[in-house]
Amino acid sequence: MKNIFLILILISSLSNYAQEIRLKGSIRDKKENPLANVTVLTNGIKTSSDAKGNFELRLKSGKQTLRFNSVGFDPLSKSITLKRDTIIHIVLSTSNINIEDVYVTAQESKNITTSSVINKEAMQLLQPSSFADLLELLPGGRAQDPNLTSFNAIKLREVNLKGKAISSDKYDMSSLGISFYVDGAPINTNSDLQSLNNYSNSTNNSSRENTNRGLDLRALGTDDIEKVTIVRGIPSVEYGDLTSGLVLIERKKGASPYTFRAKADGFGKLFALGKGYSLDENTFLNVDLGFTRSTSNPTESFENFNRATGSVRFDKTWRGSKTFNLKSYFDYNTTLDNKKTDPDNSYLLDKYYGSKQRYAWNNQLSIKYNQKWIDELQVVSNFSLNKDVIDEDKWIQARTATILVNSLEPGSHEAQYLTPSYLSHIYVEGLPFTAYHKVVSNHHITIDNFHNKLKFGLESNYSKNFGQGQVYDLNYPATATSEVTARPRTFKSIPGSHTLSGFAEDNLTWNIQNFKLEAAVGVRAFSMTSLSDDYTMGGNVYFEPRTNVRLHLPKFAVNNKPFEIILGGGVGVHKKTPTLDHLYPNLQYRDIVELNFYHNNPEFRVAQAYTDITNPINYHITPATNNKFELNTDFEYNGNRLSLTLFKENMQDAFRPYSLYKTIAYNLYDNTSIDLANLNQKPSSSDFTSVERNEFYAYTLTENASQILKNGFEFQFNTRRFSGINTRFTLNGAYYKTQYKNSQEIWKIDRDIVHNGLTRQVAGKYFDDDGYLREMLNSNFTADSYLPALGLNLSASFQALWFTVSQSMPKSGIPLAYKFAEDNLERPFTEASLTDPTLKQLVETYSPTAFLRTKVPLDLQVNLKASKSFKDYIKASVFVNRLFLYRPDYTSILGINVVRDMDAPYFGMELSISL
């Protein structure tokens, strides 16, 4: 029986083997060149052609459908019926359209708004570690080493280069005013309150903090992104709560193979995994995971950054008399900042930990109608919740007789002495929550040569922070000085913020003989419905009209090929609402030591302090407004395109911390006025003589008091991809001139001025606070070769920073007015004031060289990027930035010879696998 069973198995095996047929084939292009690495797939069986273009499969007899795929060639399906061993010959056609459409640099959008489009091919060749790396591809961009251990800001149409950009909280509007949308839903940072300001003099968090600064680009990975559109100009009125620009991110969707990416460079490592599943013909599920780790210094790991991301995206379509599409996305993102102190340089106990976890659920429903009065109805609903944590330990060593000031009530009070040495611990918990909803309807009306696409929408945006806020022991503050000007408060006690918006837009197309006119005209209106009538904004409605226009001139032929010229321009108003921190700032505490009697006998020691509490809410704050104007033109001939844009932006009321001074009256006790010889018990404050003091002390509120003026032009030239070498040449760049300045007069005090033997007695009002000018001219010339037959992608870029200019703007130094602490009355500063022995000290003098214009000449770097595909599913890539660097020495305006540093090359490599 056993032998019979073995014979049956053997016969069955021989029968199955006999049914297998050997299929051989060769794959060529139309010029009879063999094609390597072509994927051949049938019924789950997969192989690839070898270097000679040959392949072999073992298949069952019967009908088979073979699919041939290779990058740069049109896919081909071929059905054959196998009865015996067979040899076939396959010819693939070059996909000229696909090759021509492959851009590995940012391309200027052909839409009516001035914007840059970055596709996945450009991102793959760039090999980014975070979203900040993509900014290199924009006009005015430049390759820079990643810095993932500090806040990464995005700035558009201004100098944003390391060591040359403005870094001041007075001008954070540049990044705060840029809005990010991921798959149609905004990332709202208005309720982010994570801060140690006024609680600690530690700098660990200040370099990473994004409160009132907008989105930290470190949080965004790029591996799940299909396309990025960065609107530098005037966006559609559909998008609001912005002043400087708009970033639209579209992530991958649809069926796709397993993809794995691993990258390593001098600062860190990155891993990413993704897959797109086709559940049926109209249902897709995409899953992406990613992890990044980076250090501030490749030689040590005391300071590092980690990012982990996960995304699950569902997409379902139902087709019938109406087409329904439902998208439901769930995203998780976390960033971790760790910093430990080098025990060889400081205290071993010091450490810093900061984390941000974001959970987001985004749902979108689209209904397409076959009706004349409506084309489509879109509904977006997005919820997000962050869990943000700061946890810092710091070893504190106080001076002897340092007074502990921690009162929560105003007025004079007895104080204690600070523990001389202790480990402080401060914990900050934030739970920012956002609920965003939007309804948009699209319509069209066609009358003769007029075609109108109408868009109407309503939008609700709510944000609140439910966190505990700053938590620490008041007896062990995070600093031993009087810099603690705040007390703990719970974030959940702060009211939420709600903005209700509506918009209407008409996209008009008008054909006039051989001319074509396009216009996008719209208006956006919004109101902050959560504000009380105490605020100027409470109950008010603000409007943002925007217009973009383009005129297509009649095409004409040059050498039998069409030449097209497009003229355009736009004007628009853009407004950004204040954040929760702007609207509801924390109370500000000013602690003044009145008495410090530090006796050798601890039982006799006595201290008294005066605490002043100021509520710095600015009820008159209004949305920041940026007025944009631009002109542009487009020339296109035979696949070559030149785009030029001239722009001007005017923002006079950006948010900034604004210092004001108030008079504080307190008693100053003379600790030598007591009779020490007869002291036999702890004295009270009444045992000391005292004098009443009135002094100026500052407090800070948020005011619409910063001016940011931008002027410049941008250019981009793309050639067609030349056949044979499949190479495209791209030249882009920009000239930027930006002026930063205060737009309101400011008050100052000089503590060195003595009036009636006392300091802090006189304050001056000045026209100028600060002012800076930044200019730059750059160009990037890129040659990229896309060679699909070899699976090779090459790119060489020559990035020239032709010059940069920095200048502190001149100040008069002469006050406009003054006031004394004794009566706090504002008086004009006159000619007579210049002879007053006290008032003349208010005149500020500056060095003749303080306002000189500093110009730095050429800085040229050459970067190289390359990627190679193997068997259509493995890709190895490498990049080298600053492969060549040219920075000539120069003579400064002061006649000093400046020798510039030559930075070392920065390089990395990555491996991508697609199965």
Image (cartoon, rainbow, N blue to C red):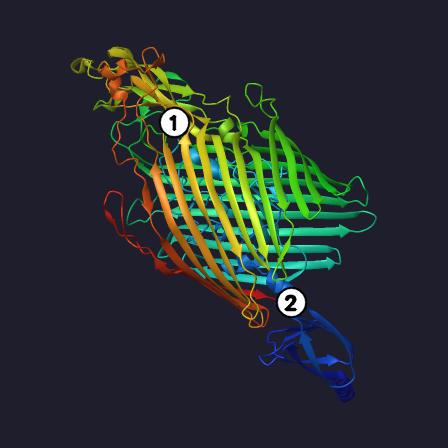
Q: In this orientation, which residue lies closer to the viewer: 771 or 192?
A: 771
Q: In this orientation, which residue lies closer to the viewer: 205 or 263?
A: 263
Q: Is residue 133 visible?
A: yes
Q: Earlier in the sequence, mark 1 or mark 2?
A: 2
Mark sitting on residue 485: 1
CA–CA distance in space, label 1 to label 2: 66 Å
Q: Residue at x 56, y 34 (%)?
A: 574
Q: Position of residue 195 (x, y in %)?
A: 44, 35
Q: Position of residue 28 (x, y in %)?
A: 64, 78
Note whether 653 is above or below 871 in the view shown: above
Question: Label 2's element?
Answer: loop
The single residue placed furthest to the left in the displayed view is 677
Q: Quadrant of the N terminus?
A: bottom right
Q: In this orientation, which residue lies closer to the viewer: 840 or 17?
A: 840
Note whether 758 is above or below 787 in the view shown: above
The single residue placed furthest to the right in the displayed view is 321
- Which residue is label 2 attached to? 95
Q: Position of residue 218 (x, y in %)?
A: 48, 48
Q: Residue at x 37, y 36 (%)?
A: 772
Note whether 232 is above or below 541 in the view shown: below
Note whether 538 is above or below 827 in the view shown: below
Q: How many neighbours does mark 1 have within 10 angstroms: few (below 14), some (14-19), or many (20 or more)? A: many
Q: In this orientation, which residue lies closer to the viewer: 570 or 19?
A: 570
- Three-letter code for the amino acid on which mark 2 is drawn: Ser
- Three-letter code for the amino acid on which mark 1 is drawn: Thr
How many discs appear?
2
